[in-house]
Amino acid sequence: MNGRVLEVSTNVFRLLRRRALLYISCSDEKDTPTQRIVVDDDVYTEIIDRAIAKRKTIDEVFLEICRRSRRAHRRFRCIRRWRLYRRNRNRSKVCKNRLLNTSFDSVMPSCAVNDMPKAIQFYLHSLGFTCVFTNGDPISFVIMKRDTVEISLHTQRLGEVPGKHGCYVKVRGVDSLYSEYQSKGVKIVHPLRDEEHGMREFMIADPDGNLINFGERTQQSQ
């Protein structure tokens, strides 16, 4: 590094070397009360001008520069910490909003069956569902769907008894659905009627005995 030579005390020399300022080149420390450093020409001019204008020694000028650089570094760290705080706070707000926006979308009841092919045919042709998912070979699990309602069927598991399951399906046009199922010979367990709890409903049973209620809220209870 080409430049001008300045002489500073050993303490200031050590401080400058720790600071590792880009515009100052420090040589190896010698066993003397003062040390030599090399600075750029423009830095040399600025240091001398400051010393003359403020009536300070070269050491005092460099100590002032080091104090300012320390304060600037502290400000930088404070700004960086603030930015990290803001970023983490925004992330926590996003996570909190996601939790607050959580809502239940739908439910899918599951019924056990003995004869999966027979059950699939019943839900397809008698109840008007479509098969949207199958799993296993032979098939041991299916999802049947009609409009937005899904019902899953699975083969008998250990200790499970088919025919002990059921679900309640809310519909619109329960009278038309009741007529449809009657015409297809679906087993009606409870005929269509208005119940005290404000629902007009009926109940059917699938070939395995699983019970499904279909109901619509009556106008008086709306």
Image (cartoon, rainbow, N blue to C red):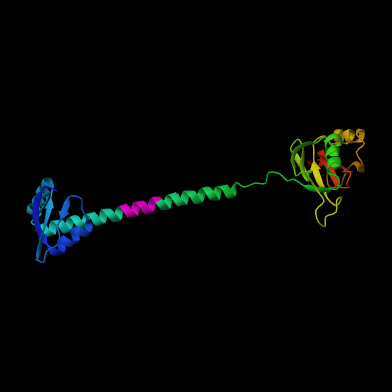
Q: Residue at x 22, y 55 (%)?
A: 20
Q: Is residue 91 left or right of residue 198?
A: left
Q: Is residue 18 left or right of residue 54?
A: right
Q: Quadrant of the C terminus?
A: top right
Q: Which of the 4 image quarters holds residue 160? A: bottom right
Question: Where does the image place residue 159, in percent across and percent down from the top left?
Answer: 82, 57
Question: Where does the image place residue 185, in percent across and percent down from the top left?
Answer: 92, 36
| In the foreground, 193 or 130 | 130
Q: Is residue 81 left or right of residue 73?
A: right
Q: Is residue 10 left or right of residue 191?
A: left
Q: Relative to 150, does residue 61 appear above or below in the rendering?
A: below
**Which segment did they paint magenta?**
76-83
Q: Is residue 56 visible?
A: no
Q: Which of the 4 image quarters holds residue 57? A: bottom left
Question: Where does the image place residue 117, in percent across and percent down from the top left?
Answer: 84, 41
Q: Residue at x 67, y 46 (%)?
A: 104
Dominant SS type (magenta): helix
Q: Residue 196 lies in magenta, yes or no?
A: no
Q: Residue furthest front?
A: 137
Question: Where does the image place residue 125, in percent across and percent down from the top left?
Answer: 85, 34
Q: Residue at x 22, y 57 (%)?
A: 19
| In the foreground, 212 or 218 | 212
Q: Residue at x 44, y 49 (%)?
A: 87
Q: Is residue 157 visible?
A: yes
Q: Relative to 80, does residue 181 appear above or below in the rendering?
A: above
| In the foreground, 111 or 147 | 111
| In the foreground, 42 or 201 | 42
Q: How many marks?
A: 0
